[in-house]
Image (cartoon, helix red, strand yellow):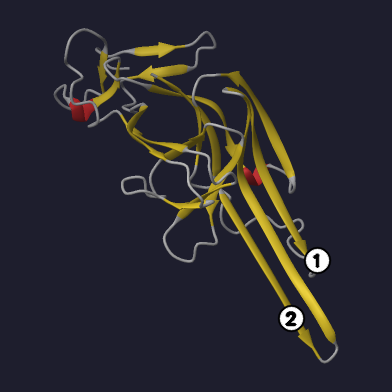
Amino acid sequence: MPTYGLRVTNNNEQIIIDSDEGFPHFIEVDSTTIVSGNDNEVDFPTGFEFNKLIFARPTESCMIMEAGNTGGARAFYRSVSSSPIQLIRADVTSGNVADHDDGYGLNVFDGSAAASASTLVFSTNTSSSLDIRSVGDYNDIAPNHTINVIINSTAPHYVLLPGSYTYTYNEAWSGPFGGASFYIEQQRGYQFNYTGNHLDSIDILNKIMSTGGGILTTTPLGYGGGAYMIVELRS
């Protein structure tokens, strides 16, 4: 550690903040709400494209994940078409806290240059923070299994949309020797479980099902094998 700087550790001696490392924390930088409607599949709105760090939150019991059947613009799927979906976009503190020097508080800079918004790695002058409740890899979940993450809170919890996935394919055909059908359903995503406005838990899904061909019953998805994440928004 250099002569000047700040390092914060927890009671297990794990580093929480180290200005020498220069790793900025993540914060909410934008938000929007997809209103209720008649569509299960909804395009990502402008500024919330799938290749950014986008988190989503339905306000009632609902499955949510990125959609793979749109054939055009990238979209996400909600199992309850009338459910409003709240979206937030996260980014690093560096360059995203313009008013960090207003009033009182604590700012931590990486020391690479003069203290400024571009070298900011932590600040108490942000209006919100994201706390990770659960994180992992879909490939670590056995096919057709779920992980139930107990939340037990009315605080807003969001899930990471990029990396999730849902896809269905259904085909039937006939020929001189009879007919056949083929069906695939794949889901890697989340199920929110509410009682009223109380979020009981979130299920992390890894559903892979096929009929008619006997394939994909144990094969992970070629896409959507990224990380899953649940975060709590403090604001």
- How far is the residue under mark 2 from the one under mark 1? 17 Å
Q: Quadrant of residue 147?
A: top right
User: Could you tell me which residue is drawn at 66 percent across and 42 percent down?
Assistant: 205
Q: Secondary structure at mark 2?
A: strand
For the point 29% across and 20% down, which residue is it? 126
Q: Left or right of 209: which side holds 119?
A: left
Mark 2 / mark 1, whichever is N-terminal:
2
Q: Are marks 2 and 1 in contact (CB under 8 Å)?
A: no
Q: Residues within 10 Å of mark 1 (few under 14, many from 20)?
A: few
Name the residue carrying label 1.
Answer: 214
Which quadrant holds the C terminus? top left
Is residue 112 in view from this perspective?
no
How crowded is the residue under tag 2: few (<14 C-alpha within 10 Å), some, or many (20+)?
A: few
Q: Secondary structure at mark 1?
A: loop
Identify residue type, mark 2.
Trp
x, y percent for residue 81: 54, 46
The residue at the point 51 percent across, 52 percent down is: 39
- Residue indicated by mark 2: 173
Whether 210 is drawn above or below 107: the answer is below
- Residue 97 appears in the rendering: yes
Q: Quadrant of the N terminus?
A: top left
Q: Nearer the viewer, residue 101 or 45?
A: 45
Quarter location, residue 214: bottom right
Could you say where residue 172 lies in the image, as x and y percent from the top left?
73, 76
In the rendered image, the residue lying farthest to the right is: 177
Whole-percent x and y of residue 142?
Answer: 73, 45
Q: Residue at x 40, y 12 (%)?
A: 8
